[in-house]
Image (cartoon, coloured by chain):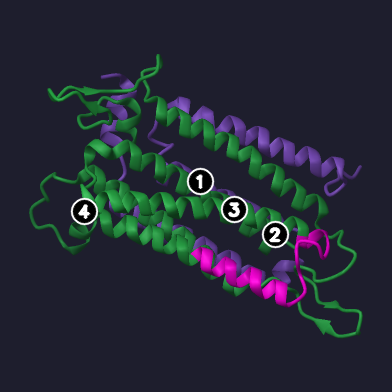
Chain colours: A green, B purple
Amino acid sequence: MASHAAAGHAPGTPGHDDGQNHVHHHYTTTGLEHRKIAIWAFIGSECMLFASLIATYLIYKGRSLVGPFPHEPWTNEAGRTFPAILDIPITSVSTFVLLMSSFAMVLGLQAVQLKGSPLPDGANWWTRIQRNSQLWIGMTALLGATFLGFQAFEFTTFVHEGLTVRTNLFGSTFFTLTSFHGAHVTVGVLWLMTLLWIDRTRGLGPKDELIVDIAALYWHFVDVVWIAIFTLVYLIR
Amino acid sequence: MSTDAQHTAHAHPTGNLYLRVAIILTLITIGEVWAYYVPALVASPLFNPALIALSAVKFAIVVLFYMHLKYDHRLFRALFTGPLIIAMCTIMALLFLFQQLAIKF
């Protein structure tokens, strides 16, 4: 499991084979895998990056002098009134898509960890399908790409409705925050496609647990950042 | 094998637990979006705090179960929660500084 890779006490923990079936682990003096420590430190630093972007959005919330506004109708110079610009139903669906991608990712990691181990007697379809790492990693990448599609649609719609990064304070802070998140999702999708390619060519197994675990941690972090953004930007008025 | 490793080796979650977590996350999200469309709830002073609380629950569930922080070494917990606490304190301090939050006496 993920924690095995961290503690390095279980068979199949990552490392490299020296040709004599001796697996070398990359431990720190803490006894923990240094790559796993590194990803958690990176995620910690990313928390502060996104906190600065979220704080900037919240500080300027409600201080735009001209529309479009996120939750209130607005009137343009010609006197025409428009509804609030945020489309909650569409964003709710994209939020659901990203949440389900995290579910697929954690099953992908589990499938890699369990690869090669025998199925229990009387295993049903759900148990069998959980062992398919290519299915879950591919589905995670697909759901991530779907989320990006929703974001592209949202950005395009906003620009057509007159909201750009230069329109007002809401536009500047909204596009900066969500674009940074979208860039992280893009990196995650590319990372997952790389893992899928490796899985399809040479196959991922328990010995690769750590590299999948690190990608999964990054992906879940992208998900939890969106959980915060969805509430603070889209739902709270 | 250390005590931590023994604990984690036997306490790891299963696919069914992951499925239950996904269902809980979905239900909370549905509840949040439903509340957004109920004017009486939106007008309540508890609307924003309740949404933030629900968001925090979702955040914690993903971190604890999907990111395995509930089962992992406490150093990883410290590496994540330390910066997270600093980040949240920074947000609060900035919101007070720029008068988006205020304490009324």
**Circle nearer the N terminus (2, 1):** 2
Total labels drawn: 4
> Of B73 and A33, which appears nearest the observer?
A33
Q: Nearer the viewer, mark 2 or mark 1?
A: 2
* Residue positioned 31% across, 44% down in the render: B13
**Circle nearer the N terminus (2, 4):** 4
Find residue A131 and name its label.
4
Q: On what subunit does the disc labeled 3 rest? A: A
- Tell me if mark 2 has few (under 14), some (14-19) or many (20+) residues whose alpha carbon lies within 10 angstroms of its own: some
> Which amino acid type is shown beneath numbered disc 4?
Arg
> Of A94 and A76, which appears nearest the observer?
A76
Which residue in the protein does label 3 denote? Answer: A181
Q: Are the residues at dot 3 and dot 4 in contact (C-beta closer than 8 Å)?
A: no
* Residue stretch in magenta: A147-171
Q: Are marks 2 and 1 on the same chain?
A: yes
Which residue in the protein does label 1 denote? Answer: A221
- Tell me if mark 1 has few (under 14), some (14-19) or many (20+) residues whose alpha carbon lies within 10 angstroms of its own: many
**Distance between the alpha carbons at the discs numbered 3 and 4:** 30 Å
Tell me where residue A232 sits by quadrant: bottom right
